[in-house]
Image (tube, rainbow, N blue to C red):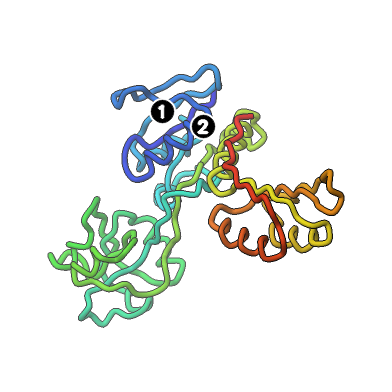
Amino acid sequence: MLRIAVPNKGMLSEPAWNMLSEAGYRLRSNPRQLVVEDPDNEIELFYLRPIDIAVYVGRGTVDVGVTGRDLLLNSGTKAVEHLQLGFGASTFRFAAPNESGIEDLADIDGKRVASSFDKLVDDYLKEHGIHADIIHLDGAVESSVHLGVADLIADVVSTGTTLRNAGLRIFAEPILHSEAILIRSPRISIEDERLIVLSRRLQGVLTAQRYVLMDYDIPVSKVAIAVGITPGFESPTVSSLHDKQWAAVRAMVPKQQVNNLMDRLYEIGARAIIVTALQASRM
């Protein structure tokens, strides 16, 4: 069986569970289950703390896992990023007190930096030739400056409201753009059929989440223009209709562009436009 680690809690947990469910895998039936066997799909799920998943995968205790890119890089393990999963996006930034003179990366040299991701931050600063005292805190790092523990912080930033409320401002370029990823153990081959099946199913879920099928009829004289408007995820399918002056087109298009694409198609004479949701492939 393929052993898969999934987050047992946190912001990545529910989207990860939903993705696996949509891919056709069995999940736990109650929150106390730590291990779920799914013999029909030849997998075994392990519900672990998000911060520990990269460690288990890196050591080969489990074959693959769902975690954040930031957690993987901070773990220092040999686990490998295998597939981006399209959720849990975050940005990792430096922030300093509003009244401080810390304005750019060079100003961090010799300062105290509080972070929950001490290895990630230390590696980043050393890569840029900067030496700082990295102070590890497990949470609420924005309080560390006010309490005199650190001169600045490095943390995940979404809206920045928490930082502003703490009297901090963002500066310098982002340290990292993170998101949920599927990681694999260095002990499992990328050619492993079990890994290929899992990857294919997850890709199918991603495609179903991002794209829809668009069917429409178009005058034959406008087919080339229409196909240019809806090139699709793959090449559109063009079929003849009983009325030889018209053709039917089927294209897989991004969900976010549907309304704009429909307007453009109507402008060139398309008719009978139908949009259908995709189903995730479980092959």
Q: Secondary structure at mark 1?
A: strand
Observer-nearest of 111 and 258: 258
Residue linked to disc 1: 46
User: The disc labelled 2 sits on which kind of residue?
Assistant: Asp
* Quarter of the view holding residue 242: top right
User: The disc labelled 1 sits on which kind of residue?
Assistant: Phe
Report, in whole angstroms, how far the alpha carbon at label 2 lies from the one at label 1.
11 Å
Q: State whether residue 202 is above or below residue 84.
A: above
Seen in the image, is 252 located left or right of residue 147?
Answer: right
Q: Residue furthest left?
A: 147
Observer-nearest of 226 and 255: 226
Classify 10 Å Cα crowding around label 2: few (below 14), some (14-19), many (20 and above).
many
Q: Secondary structure at mark 2?
A: loop
Classify 10 Å Cα crowding around label 1: few (below 14), some (14-19), many (20 and above).
many
* Quarter of the view holding residue 208: top right
Q: Residue at x 67, y 50 (%)?
A: 272
Q: Earlier in the sequence, mark 2 or mark 1?
A: 1
Between disc 2 and disc 1, the foreground one is 1
* Quadrant in which the C terminus is drawn: top right
Q: Position of residue 30 (x, y in %)?
A: 31, 23
Observer-nearest of 236 and 135: 236
Q: State whether residue 261 is above or below residue 14.
A: below
Q: Position of residue 261 (x, y in %)?
A: 62, 60
Q: Residue at x 44, y 55 (%)?
A: 178
Q: Residue at x 41, y 28 (%)?
A: 46
Disc number placed over residue 172 in the picture, else none: none
Cβ atoms under marks 2 and 1 closer than 8 Å: no
Seen in the image, is 242 located left or right of residue 53?
Answer: right
Residue linked to disc 2: 63
